[in-house]
Amino acid sequence: MNATLECLQGDIAHQPEFDAVVNAANAQLRPGGGVAGALHRAAGPALDRACRPLAPIRPGEAVITGAFGLPNRHVIHCLGPVYGVDEPADALLAACYRNALTLAERQGLASVAFPAISTGVFGYPPAEAARVALGAVIATLPDCPHIERVRFVLFDATGAELFRRTLATLQGAP
Ligand code: AR6
């Protein structure tokens, strides 16, 4: 894998050096709270209008729009599984990351920033979500030669540390 993969604390709505940011969306692709609220607020109402014809989406699915007021070229909207409801949760969560990267690759994008999909309102336990998310990205990047840089943006320091430790484990660090 030649792409850079990093995990930082931050706000997904403030990632100006990334071609695409990923939204932890709801099925109707409406603004909502959390990540979706932050991205729609920063993008402005044009993002909501662009989303309407693409809704609804299913768990694991990803769709792409422009980014409007955001400092990115595109927003990729993923519907994560609701933990304990949408099954199999791990396969559906992994599909979000794989489908988002595949869409970015098809658009020729070089950089994508992800939030920790499903770990907020949708209740996915963070440690399991980190393993699934990072594992899916590591498994998909070899099929995405255009993508040079992937960042996980975690809202708090604990989340960023968890993702960094999980990445080190998956990459075989001591
Ligand atoms: N930047 C980075 N991470 C964030 C931000 C932010 N600005 N805001 C929250 N997080 P969530 P979900 C973290 O609930 O679980 C929405 O209402 C947050 O701490 O946004 O997939 C939608 O409309 C958590 O760790 O997404 C859907 O209905 C993670 O991002 C539903 O919530 C994901 O939290 C989707 O739920």
Image: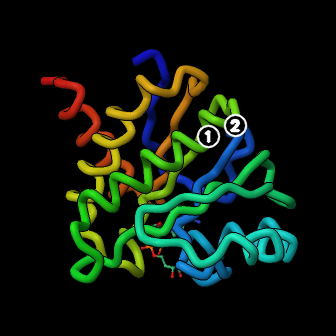
* Vertical comparison of 89 with 102: above or below: below
Circle 2 — which element?
loop
- Label of residue 14 in the image: none
Q: Is residue 18 left or right of residue 91?
A: right
Q: Residue at x 47, y 46 (%)?
A: 152
Q: Nearer the viewer, residue 9 or 3?
A: 3
Work out whether residue 11 can be spotted: no
**Circle 2 residues within 10 Å: few <14, some 14–19, many ≥20:** few
Q: Is mark 2 within 8 Å of ligand 1?
A: no
**In the rendering, at what x and y percent does residue 116 appear?**
42, 59
Amino acid bearing label 2: Gln
**In the rendering, at what x and y percent does residue 11 appear?**
60, 58
* Figure quadrant of the N terminus: top left
Q: Residue at x 24, y 26 (%)?
A: 171
Q: Residue at x 86, y 60 (%)?
A: 69
* Vertical comparison of 25 with 161: above or below: below
Amino acid bearing label 1: Ala
Q: Is residue 64 left or right of residue 78?
A: right
Q: Residue at x 24, y 72 (%)?
A: 87
Work out whether residue 49 can be spotted: yes
The Cα–Cα distance between marks 2 and 1, rounded to whole angstroms, is 5 Å
**In the rendering, at what x and y percent does residue 89 appear?**
25, 67
Tag 2 and tag 1, C-beta contact below 8 Å? yes
Residue with the mark numbered 2: 107
Q: Nearer the viewer, residue 25 or 71?
A: 25
Residue with the mark numbered 1: 104
**Circle 1 residues within 10 Å: few <14, some 14–19, many ≥20:** many
Q: Is residue 66 left or right of residue 173?
A: right
**In the rendering, at what x and y percent does residue 163 appear?**
32, 47
* Figure quadrant of the C terminus: top left
Q: Is mark 1 within 8 Å of ligand 1?
A: no
